[in-house]
Amino acid sequence: MPDVVVVGGGPVGIFAAILLAQEGVDVQVLERRTARSSHSRAIGIHPPALAALEQAEVADRLIAEGVKIPGGVARSRGRTVAELSFASLPGRHPFVLAIPQEQTERILSGRLAELAPDALRRGETVEAIHDVGTQVLTVTSGGTHRSRLVIGADGARSTVRDAAGIRAGIRPYRDAYVMGDFPDNTGDGSTAALYLEPDGIVESFPLPGSVRRWVVRMPSLVDSPSAQTVAGLVRERTGIPVDTRNNTMLSSFAVRRRIAERFVQGRIALIGDAAHEVSPIGGQGMNLGWLDAAQLMPLVVASLGGADVGLGLRRFNSERRQAAMTAARQAHINMLLGRPLPPPVLTARNRVMGRIAAVRSVHDAVARTFTMH
Ligand SMILES: Cc1cc2nc3c(=O)[nH]c(=O)nc-3n(C[C@H](O)[C@H](O)[C@H](O)COP(=O)(O)OP(=O)(O)OC[C@H]3O[C@@H](n4cnc5c(N)ncnc54)[C@H](O)[C@@H]3O)c2cc1C
């Protein structure tokens, strides 16, 4: 019987399993997909998460493949509104690392395979969980797995969360976005750029291989946007001609917030999107999940060794819920900043923003907030 079953082999479940395997814990990851998802989602890794990833010995591998974003610029109708530098951030990583989630997951899975080659079991869909006091039974399409503890890292529609009877209210937002990856012809290099325009925000982030991700706010969800649609919107709002010929990714998404009422119940704990889904605008969801795992896994190891970790679990529950709510608030502010505004109101708002951001102490506080410090 393994000590721990992790349900979900996404970035958070795999990271949790690495931390456990490094401590000699017998861990099994049950993942319903037979292959890694190529659907593009997270690109931004923040400094506190990089510090946590160092514990798993993957930070250097990620840094070697990613782009270090040293700061950003906000523009509006051809003018610079404000500039933000991460140079003053504390710690060893004064930048946000940009790397597609698929690459991140490949690096994490590679590290887990080095430590425990058979830990990840693909093609296992978890259907039910029964906490029977001294152990937990995890029922999958392939049979029943017994373990001493179960960690639910099975994403926003978590089966583990539902099986444990943990409620998680959904708050939908009226914001929706289209996005696409295109060859970088901006001259912005590794700088992130936000275009605060009357019809809504356009965001542009560097990616490895001289690619840029463009994210455009929309009035409602657009099904299957084309490269021409995304490029047309970017050009209309910013004047920048995007080359549609070598487009490598297209997607659209609407935004919800869903935070579980508690993250621990008996022998079951939730981490990552299973515990909290926050808006991608601000790029914090995956980072939050890794920080959940970094706080929870030492408690799991101690509890398997017989220690009383009740107090630690209560702190995990309250501190990580608080962190999720802070991230959700931050993401909400980011979304508000990107909503359409009539030109005179936008100009006045941007002028105030520019003046405030030029104050050193405010600039540094904003840089820390944007990077989850
Ligand atoms: C457009 C977009 C951009 C984003 N950008 C960022 C960003 O820049 N930075 C950031 O930090 N976050 C970002 N996010 C959020 C980030 O993608 C998620 O927070 C992250 O994927 C959560 O990881 P996870 O491992 O908790 O869940 P998931 O990635 O959802 O993984 C869960 C895994 O569990 C598996 N699973 C589900 N149910 C079962 C079951 N019953 N049995 C077995 N396996 C199961 C799934 O197949 C999946 O592999 C973005 C999201 C989107 C949509």
Image (spheres, rainbow, N blue to C red):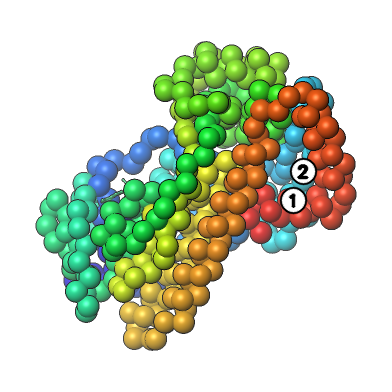
Provide residue 275's location: percent of width, then percent of height: 42, 58
Q: Residues within 10 Å of mark 1 (few under 14, many from 20)?
A: some
Q: Is residue 138 left or right of residue 280?
A: left
Mark nearer the N terminus (2 vs 1): 2
Q: Residues within 10 Å of mark 2 (few under 14, many from 20)?
A: some
Inspect the image, locate mark 2, and give the three-letter code of the amino acid beneath it.
Leu
Whole-percent x, y for residue 92 in the image: 68, 59
**Picture coordinates of residue 328 (x, y %)?**
56, 51
Label 1 element class: helix
Q: CA distance from mark 2 to mark 1?
A: 8 Å
Query: Which of these two is toward me, 23 or 323?
Result: 323
Looking at the image, is 255 positioned above or below residue 93? above
Residue sitting nearer the eye, 256 or 268: 256
Which residue does the image show at 70% across and 28% down from the upper left? 341
Q: What residue did someone put label 1 on?
A: 366
Mark 1: which amino acid? Val
- Residue at the extreme left: 143
| Rendered image: mark on residue 84 | 2
Q: Residue at x 62, y 20 (%)?
A: 234
Which residue is depicted at the point 32% across and 58% down?
Answer: 161
Q: Residue 274: horizontal and vertical position, in percent? A: 38, 54
Question: Do residues under tags 2 and 1 come within 8 Å of each other at their CB atoms?
Answer: yes
Dot 2 lies on which element? strand
